[in-house]
Image (cartoon, grey):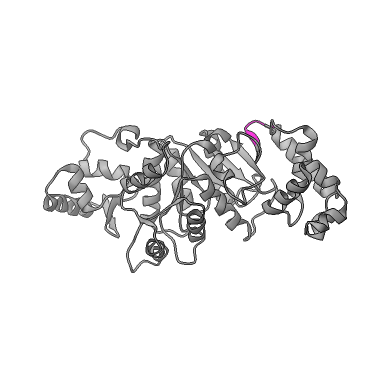
Amino acid sequence: MQAACLSPAELEARLRLHSLPEMGPKRIRKLFTAFDSASAALSAPASAWRALGMPQVSCDARRSPQVREQAAAALLWLEQERHHLLVRDDPAYPALLGELSDAPPLLFVAGDPGILEMPQLAMVGSRNASKPGLDTAHSFARSLAAGGFVITSGLALGVDGAAHQGALDAVGKTVAVLGTGLQRIYPARHKRLAEEIVCSGGALVSELPLDCAPHASNFPRRNRIISGLSLGVLVVEASPASGSLITARLAAEQGREVYAIPGSIHHPGAKGCHQLIREGATLVESIEDIMQALRGWHSAIPTVHPQADLPLNDPAEHPILSLLRVAPHSSEALAFTLESNFSEVLVQLTELELEGRVICEAGLWMLRGNL
């Protein structure tokens, strides 16, 4: 679907402008301020571009065959089912993202663009997350998606993939923001996951040209979109040098909530989360910690009833296992929720741990494997 608010000529001009080298959101915005349209900007003399401080390489490429071919290929892509383009002055452009000073001038979307206006929670973390970290990401995403949140992440290996899959397993919605063009799914092993996201009513999103390959500089740009679309960002597991911390700091700068799940002081993957907590992120032990903060931030938050929305468990299942299917819990939280004596809950947890059914990581109990 092409952007309804644009004429065919202006749409083609915007795609050409978007394909120019060294032409980012702020430069495009500067050109629009000076010339009112992409068509006028492309037709302006080189001297006018130089006066605006545009790079010479951008100016020289305006009429190159390659740029025209890229625009033509994008127009053909838009004719296919479930393919969309959102431009910043389109009423359908996601409002939260549009608030950013460096909001993408256009977004390629594969899937349902309407979910970009639904309440979203971003979940990010290490590509090399531990098994408990992956289980935590999956469990939190599953519970939040079942309650009506769209889970937004970056399609990367590790925590991102677990979060997307958790949302899908809850028959919920999830958005994957790519650091490549939508015709270059990265990493390749997540091509099937990307297809599932689209087929389930979710969306793949990228501001990059459709055939753009993965480059290190693309991923920080991708991260600002992940946080910009979302009400808040939950960091599950991350090292101090992780790109997830970039996403979290961008979220804080954008006025979004930042959450972090703590871990063992001996686990390197917990150090980034601990650093965020020291810097003011909300420490998260349960879904309720997120809900409490978000309800004060935004009036359109869905009410999460995870146990009601998730597939029914076996009535004979141990009540602790039923709770842990929803999200990781501390021992104290389990005792409170079950209205049981704390020491009795500890005995039951020990028995379940010896049976290989649960595991405790950084004070949070969770299911072991795919029970």
Q: Residue furthest bottom?
A: 266
Q: Is residue 322 left or right of residue 297?
A: left
Q: Is residue 106 magenta?
A: no
Residue 160, given in percent of the width and then of the height, sits at 48, 51
Residue 65, given in percent of the width and then of the height, sits at 85, 48
Residue 13, given in percent of the width and then of the height, sits at 79, 41
Residue 229 higher or lower than 361, as above or below: above
Q: Is residue 65 left or right of residue 288?
A: right
Residue 112 higher or lower than 344, as above or below: above
Q: Where, quadrant-wise, is the N terminus in this rendering?
A: top right
Q: Residue at x 71, y 37 (%)?
A: 77
Q: Is residue 83 magenta?
A: yes
Q: Residue at x 17, y 48 (%)?
A: 335
Please report the bounds of the magenta region as a residue range: 80-84
Q: Where, quadrant-wise, is the C terminus in this rendering?
A: top left
Frontmost residue, 325 versus 7: 7
Q: Residue at x 28, y 35 (%)?
A: 313
Q: Does residue 338 appear in the picture of this structure?
A: yes
Frontmost residue, 296 versus 181: 296
Q: Main secondary structure of the magenta part?
A: loop
